[in-house]
Image (cartoon, rainbow, N blue to C red):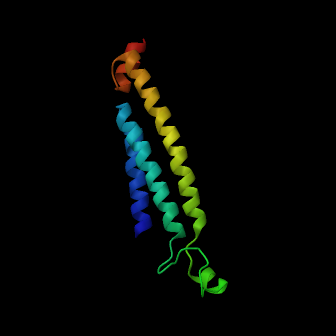
Amino acid sequence: MIYTLCFVLFLVGLYGVTCKKNIVKIILGFLIMEHSVNLFLILLGWKKDGITPVLGKGMSSDMLVRNAVDPLPQAMVLILIVIGLGILALMVAFAIRLYQKYGTFDITEMNKLKH
């Protein structure tokens, strides 16, 4: 069920990217899509009653392998957050430059002004 909710969240972001005409709303759609992918990756590594993947006192490596959550999706999400922040900064910079040039955030108005 929760994977379906991730997919619905992704579709909401995709709707914002494809159907909206405002650049700010398009950027927010990209952010929603990014967060839904991050959530999906975290859920892939989740395990019920999971423990931190750190070997402690009195813990055998067998018990750690059986009960620990998968740390790889967590590491991937950390990297994706940093990459997403860079992409967000680039999109906002482009949006600011387009606003300075055309005086609007509306894509249809920019197309009209271009001709």
Q: Reply above or below: 13 against 50.
A: above
Which one is in front, 111 or 47? 47
Residue at 39% from the left image edge and 18% from the top image edge: 100
Name the spot of residue 55 as percent of width and height, x first.
Answer: 61, 78
Name the spot of residue 47 as percent of width and height, x first.
Answer: 51, 76
Q: Reply above or below: 10 against 52.
A: above
Q: Picture quarter containing residue 101?
A: top left
Name the spot of residue 81 as percent of width and height, x first.
Answer: 51, 50
Residue at 38% from the left image edge and 21% from the top image edge: 99
Q: Picture quarter containing residue 102?
A: top left
Looking at the rendering, in which quadrant would you find the C terminus?
Answer: top left
- Outermost residue, top side: 115
56 relative to 90 in the view: left or right:
right
Q: Is residue 98 visible?
A: yes
Residue at 48% from the left image edge and 67% from the top image edge: 43
81 relative to 31 in the view: left or right:
right
